[in-house]
Structure formats: structure tokens, C-alpha cells
């Protein structure tokens, strides 16, 4: 990949996450929220922004990052994602305990809560699976299916969660980020499939 | 010669009115017979602080919470009922005591309390109302504003005697 192209890719990807963050930082709603609530909201937006990079890191298509290094960064981003989700939930809990308890128990009146909670558990499950991958002795094929399924649950759950929330995120930048996150997942799943097919063909030839 | 007055607007208005009354006619027997008690909404009691004081206005005002209180079964409007109201507003969080206040229904069973503008919190612009005075079963409501820029919100109680 030539340098100009990689610069363009990085500018586009960083704009896709920085612009929504800046737009949210300019939200009038912030004036009426305490710091812990604001922090909780931004932890959520940050976690969501990480979802744009996770699939691309996993298949090693980000310019300037080798596939191997991409996988390593993917793990660290995964852990950051989990920590950001935890910060999001704790911050909201401190702000309004009964609303978060309702959400975690799936009895919240807000339809977006359940989507977020399901995505949260899928994040935790992913991290646990990575951690205990060796111990569980999952076969590579099965591992891939489980990990991709969890990734899909995380992305779809988070997108629906974000779309349904009337919060600090500005509607257009939020929609563009949501579409990009979905596209990144779709692209990665498709590419991973092609990569795998090529690998199988190569192996069968030798 | 008189020209026909049936413009498209009149036609549409008339048809809508006929449809509305006929549909209403189908539904109204159930409503007229039975004012079913309002059920507490999920999350309605969140951040409730019992015994909110009776106030003329919560904070600086500018937003109106309105509604009505009726008796279950016969639908008789209930006067003098205490309704407690709280929300996340431009002047405070739901958990702040100064975001809470109460008002009484008038002789028509209606209430109206001025309060600061409600702003979206926890994903939706919403308010909380409670009837918790003991003569009727306790009800907590959590109405949602159709638009965050609305300056009024209403909620209606049909209470079941204890």
C-alpha cells in the first residue's frame, strides 16, 4: 500500500471517531450533568469508537500495522474496551443507581438498555474466552465461530444501543459512526472468510 | 347558483372525523364502563424521595407538568389529591431534593405544576410522577416527552381505592 493511501485511510478512520467525540463534547446537555455522568457518557462513546478499529486490527488491514502486531494491538484494544464499558456502567451507577440496576436486570423502561447490557456481557465473554482459550482447548474452527459471533453481538448490540439513545452524541455524526462500525465488522467478516478460503486452498495444494 | 363547498380539505377533515368517531364508538363502550386503574410504569419509582413538599413551583419554572386524577371504575375526577413530581431538569438531577415537589388536584381532578425545563437524561427526556398518599393504591408514572424541546408534559392517574 503506498504511503499516500495509508495517510488517507488513517485520516478517514480518525475523523470518523474524533468528529463524533468533538460533537458530543459540544452537546448542550453537558451543562446540566455532573462530572461523573459526563465521564460515564464519554466512556461509552470511547468504547463505541474502539469498535471501529477492532475488526480491522483483527484481519490486519490497517496501514502500517503488520498482521501480527495488529493481533497484539487487537488484544489490548479489547481489554481497553472492557475497561471503558466497566467505567461507563460504574459512572452511570453512581449517577442513578436504580436506573442501572433496572438495566442490568433487563427490566428497564428504556429499550436501548437491554441492547447495551447484552453487548456488555458479550465483551466480558470475549475477554474471558481469550484469557482461557488454551485451558478450554477450543479447536481453531470453533474458536473462530464463537469469537466472530460474540463480535457480531457486541457490534450490533452497541449500534442499536447508541442509535436509540437521546444523549450527548450529535445525530448525524453518531449515525455515520454507527454505519462505519457496522461496515468495519461486515468487511472484516467477509475478508476473514476469503483469507481462510485461500489458506485452505493453499494447504490442499501442498 | 351555489357552488359546492366540498373542498379537498373539507372532505379530508370530514372523512377523518367520521372515521375517528366510528373507531371511537367501537372502543368507547369498554372505556365508559370501566376506568381501569393506571398501572405503575417500569422505572417510575426511580429516585423517588417520599414526602416531596407541596410547592407553588419547582425552582425557576418555565416548564409545565400537567395531568388528571380519576377514580377507577366510575372515572369520577378526584379533587385535592397530592401528586409528587421530579425529573432531571436544567436546575438539577433527579436525585437532588430540590428537583422534587408536589401539587394538589383542583375540583376537576386536574393538576398543573410549573418546574424547570426537563432535559434528556439516561437516554430519554422523561419525568416522574407519584401518587403515594395512602387513600388509593400507590402509582408511579414515568412519561416520556415526544420531543426534548417540548415545554410541557402530561400524565394521567386512574386510582384504585385501597
Image (tube, rainbow, N blue to C red):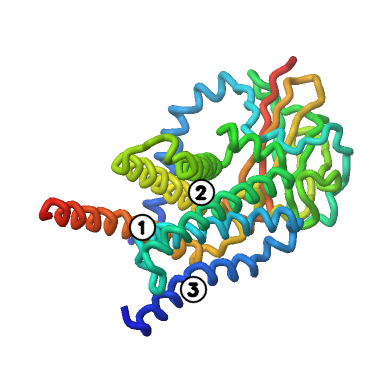
**Residue closest to the far top:** B162
In which quadrant of the rendered view does residue A45 lie? bottom right
Give the letter of the chain under mark 3. A
Q: Give the SS element for disc 3.
A: helix
Q: Can you identify the residue that label 2 sits on? A: A161
Q: Is residue B2 visible?
A: no
Secondary structure under tag 1 reads: helix
Q: Which residue is mark 1?
A: B8
Mark 1 or mark 2, whichever is nearer to me: 2
User: Is residue A152 shown above or below A6?
Assistant: above
Q: List the residue tagged with mark 3.
A: A15
Image location (x, y in percent) of residue B106: 80, 35
Residue positioned 37% across, 52% down in the render: B11
* Gap between marks 1 and 2 measured at Cα: 43 Å
How crowded is the residue under tag 3: few (<14 C-alpha within 10 Å), some, or many (20+)?
few
**x, y percent for residue A93:** 69, 43
Q: Are marks 3 and 2 in contact (CB under 8 Å)?
A: no
- Say few, some or many: other residues with alpha carbon within 10 Å of mark 1 (under 14 / 14 to 19 / 20 or more): few
Q: Are marks 3 and 1 in contact (CB under 8 Å)?
A: no
Residue B101 quadrant: top right
> Which image quarter holds the N terminus of chain B?
bottom left
Amino acid at each position: 500500500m503506498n504511503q499516500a493511501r495509508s495517510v488517507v485511510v488513517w485520516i478517514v478512520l480518525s475523523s470518523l471517531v474524533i468528529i463524533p467525540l468533538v460533537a458530543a463534547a459540544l452537546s448542550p446537555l453537558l451543562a446540566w450533568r455532573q462530572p461523573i455522568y459526563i465521564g460515564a457518557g464519554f466512556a461509552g462513546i470511547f468504547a463505541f469508537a474502539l469498535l471501529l478499529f477492532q475488526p480491522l486490527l483483527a484481519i490486519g488491514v490497517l496501514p502500517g500495522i503488520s498482521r501480527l502486531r495488529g493481533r497484539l494491538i487487537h488484544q489490548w484494544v479489547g481489554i481497553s474496551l472492557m475497561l471503558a464499558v466497566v467505567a461507563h456502567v460504574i459512572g452511570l451507577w453512581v449517577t442513578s443507581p436504580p436506573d442501572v440496576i433496572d438495566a442490568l436486570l433487563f427490566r428497564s423502561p428504556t429499550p436501548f438498555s437491554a441492547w447495551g447490557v447484552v453487548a456488555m456481557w458479550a465483551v466480558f465473554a470475549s475477554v474471558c474466552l481469550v484469557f482461557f482459550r488454551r485451558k478450554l482447548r477450543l479447536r481453531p474452527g470453533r474458536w473462530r465461530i464463537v469469537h466472530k459471533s460474540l463480535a457480531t453481538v457486541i457490534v450490533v448490540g452497541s449500534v442499536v444501543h447508541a442509535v436509540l439513545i437521546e444523549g450527548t452524541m450529535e445525530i448525524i455524526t453518531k449515525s455515520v459512526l454507527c454505519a462505519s462500525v457496522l461496515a468495519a465488522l461486515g468487511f472484516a467478516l467477509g475478508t476473514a472468510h476469503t483469507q481462510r478460503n485461500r489458506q485452505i486452498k493453499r494447504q490442499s495444494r501442498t | 347558483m351555489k357552488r359546492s363547498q366540498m373542498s379537498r380539505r373539507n372532505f379530508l377533515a370530514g372523512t377523518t372525523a367520521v372515521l375517528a368517531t366510528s373507531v371511537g364508538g367501537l372502543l368507547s363502550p369498554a372505556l365508559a364502563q370501566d376506568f381501569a386503574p393506571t398501572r405503575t410504569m417500569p422505572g417510575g419509582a426511580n429516585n423517588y424521595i417520599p414526602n416531596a413538599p407541596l410547592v407553588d413551583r419547582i425552582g425557576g419554572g418555565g416548564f409545565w407538568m400537567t395531568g388528571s386524577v380519576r377514580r377507577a371504575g366510575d372515572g369520577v375526577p378526584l379533587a385535592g389529591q397530592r401528586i409528587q413530581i421530579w425529573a432531571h431538569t436544567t436546575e438539577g438531577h433527579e436525585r437532588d431534593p430540590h428537583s422534587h415537589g408536589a401539587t394538589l388536584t383542583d375540583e376537576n381532578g386536574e393538576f398543573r405544576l410549573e418546574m424547570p425545563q426537563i432535559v434528556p437524561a439516561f437516554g430519554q427526556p422523561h419525568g416522574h410522577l407519584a401518587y403515594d398518599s395512602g387513600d388509593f393504591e400507590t402509582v408511579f408514572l414515568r412519561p416520556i416527552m415526544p420531543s426534548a424541546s417540548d415545554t410541557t408534559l402530561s400524565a394521567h392517574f386512574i386510582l384504585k381505592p385501597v
